[in-house]
Image (tube, rainbow, N blue to C red):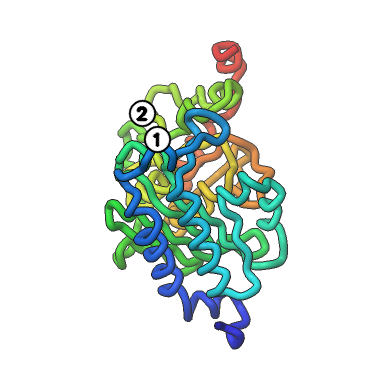
Amino acid sequence: MIEDIETIDEFLAHRTSDVEEVIRQAAAAEIMPRFRQLAAHEIDQKSGPHDLVTDADRKAEEFLTEALTALLPGSVVVGEEAVHADPASYGAIGGRAPVWIVDPVDGTRQFVHGDPGFCTLVALVLDGVVHASWTFAPAREEFATALRGRGAVLDGVPLRSGSPEPGRDLDIAMSHPDYTTDDQKRALLGLRSEGVVARPCGSAGLEYLAVARGELDATAFSWEAAWDHAAGLLLVEEAGGAHRTLGGEPFRVTGGNALPFTAARDEATARRVVALLEPRSEQVAAGA
């Protein structure tokens, strides 16, 4: 219990490692025992054949929900699977209580196919501001954390995103075509430009980690679901990167963003990507 801890900063000063331990326990108990061991009846579709959910997703989110709210009394959880069951619960992100934003298995398709490119994402939000984030890739044994104003680390080593090498093509991971509407595909047409090498994204959380460690220059995403973005955006920001929406503003986890948006290794790259994403009449015509 933490009755004597009154602020989020005080909570994080005392309990950051406890949150990490809870996430490791959830992965050990509910995710990794099912990795490459899933039976057909443990896999379901949500909105369609590319939108999968497994028993690992559900059980890990239940574990995290119970443990995280016990660590921080009065907090609530906005989790991907709970919101699928009750869309109205997403509104808690804009409420007054501290919110844990949880994606129990980010990269479920990879998880289902036995690919280690998945992770668990947790972010702690208050009044619409992400104060801390945890990104755990259990199959890779990589754990990244970020605390607002205090930097980001990967397995205890500080993360610095750096800047792209001048004159080199930008490497960008963008929304996977299987998950985009026709309008979203048209919005991303600007990335088909000279000087850009764009590819479909895998786990959003791991793409953000790649930006934070300087292995990927930028992302370009066309959807807002906070569980995919909250943890990674803070990770990139605290590693020295930047994120911008089509309107030129930082991404807001509470929603209402001008899409698409980008997270990039530095401010200049973020603005360059936004400029590429700005609607052009010839792009609209080409995509019509």
Comparing 269 with 213, the one in front is: 213
Nearest to N terminus: mark 2 or mark 1: 1
Image position of 224 with respect to 74: above or below:
above
Location of residue 230 in the rendering, given as x and y in whole percent from the top left corner? 53, 53
* Disc on res. 27: none
When the figure is inspected, residue 272 is found, relative to residue 78, above or below; the finding is above
Q: Tag 1's secondary structure?
A: strand
**In the picture, residue 38 is in which quadrant?**
top left
Horizontally, is 84 left or right of 132 in the view?
Answer: right
Give the percent coordinates (x, y) of residue 177.
47, 26
Query: Between marks 2 and 1, how big is the CA–CA gap?
Result: 6 Å
Q: Secondary structure at mark 2?
A: strand
Which residue is at a point 52% across and 27% down the rendered structure image? 188
Locate residue 256 relative to residue 144 in the image: left or right.
Answer: right
Q: In the rendering, at what x and y percent does residue 146 appear?
A: 44, 63
**Amino acid type of disc 1?**
Ile
Q: Which residue, given by chain and number where applicable, does mark 1 sit on?
A: 172
Q: Which mark is residue 197?
A: 2
Q: Are the residues at dot 2 and dot 1 in contact (C-beta closer than 8 Å)?
A: yes
Q: Residues within 10 Å of mark 1 (few under 14, many from 20)?
A: many
Residue at x-position 43% and y-position 68%: 22
